Image (cartoon, rainbow, N blue to C red):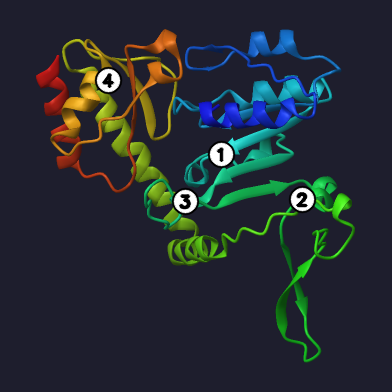
Amino acid sequence: MHPETRSVTETYARGHDITVKEVPFENGVTSVKELEKMLSGEVACVVIQQPNFFGNIEPVDEISEKVQAAGATLIVKVNPMSLGVLRPPAEYGAEIVVGEGQVFGNPMAFGGPFLGILAVKNKYLRRMPGRLVGETVDNRGQRGFVLTLQTREQHIRRERATSNICSNEALNALAATVYLSWLGKEGIKELAEHCVTKAHYLADAISGLKGYELAWNTPFFNEFAVKCPVDPEKIVKSLVSKEILAGYPLGRAYPELKDHLLIAVTEKRTKKEMDDLLAGLEGLA
């Protein structure tokens, strides 16, 4: 899981006396063997990220099988862009799916803005916070949309409300809706394929440089970790001066990976930009 996600989860859980335990990783993905040891009737849920923080594809079928056998709920955090090529979480047993919709047509500006994505199975529908919109027909027989299944603090007793937040991400959601409408099903698939193809081109090229190697031999989407011959912090600092954002030094979140750099490649990156990064890395080795 993303280290910031873990930190926020632990903060919320502490106030409710919920114990949060982290499952170790093996070869860049969740260790199914360790997960199985930790599962019991006391486990409420298991949260995984797909692709995970390292960019790797988790063994979701094995994880889901173990979680369901223990009677726990499977929650999946997704990169929605990856769903253009990866299976939807519901197909492998996820009951709650969360994600970040910024990748759909919302440019970054000083760390934001963002729009959250939350989907649940029907049994959790009435416990969802926020504004739920349902389709209906008006008195003239025309198709329309209305707020429905609301349990907001403005409408019922405050202590029973599932939502008492009034921040509005509708503008970002609208931008994402327009973006998705423009792309269509085939467009999203094509965009996801661009991410995969470009990321693998760069990964193969970097692993061919002297001193650099991929951290794991695990399938990945558009992010991958590289073991570096020099301090990743030095790499990032040096290449920033050349207007290249090389990646994220994994030692900041995982001390045992202090010589690893996490690199992301989106559909926006050009071959020239990737080749410039390669030249910069080679010059530092």
Q: Which of labels 2 and 1 is toward the front? A: 2
Which labelled disc corresponds to residue 78? Answer: 1
Q: Which of labels 4 and 1 is toward the front? A: 4
Which labelled disc corresponds to residue 216? Answer: none
Dot 3 or dot 4: first in sequence order is 3
What is the distance, in whole Å, between disc 2 and disc 1 at their CAs? 18 Å
What is the distance, in whole Å, between disc 3 and disc 1 at their CAs? 12 Å
Q: Where in the figure is residue 93, as x and y percent of width and height?
A: 72, 34
What is the distance, in whole Å, between disc 3 and disc 4 at their CAs? 27 Å
Left or right for 240, reference 197: left
Q: Where in the figure is residue 95, as x and y percent of width and height?
A: 74, 39
Work out whether residue 11 can be spotted: yes
Q: Where in the figure is residue 83, as x and y percent of width and height?
A: 52, 44
Question: Is the Cβ of the residue at disc 3 closer than 8 Å to that at disc 4?
Answer: no
Q: Secondary structure at mark 4?
A: helix
Which labelled disc corresponds to residue 128? Answer: 2
Q: Secondary structure at mark 1?
A: strand
Dot 2 or dot 4: first in sequence order is 2
101 is higher (above) or lower (below) than 70 = below
Label 3: which residue?
A: 102
Label 4: which residue?
A: 233
Q: Residues within 10 Å of mark 4 (few under 14, many from 20)?
A: some
Q: Where in the figure is residue 55, as x and y percent of width and height?
A: 44, 28
Left or right for 72, reference 192: right
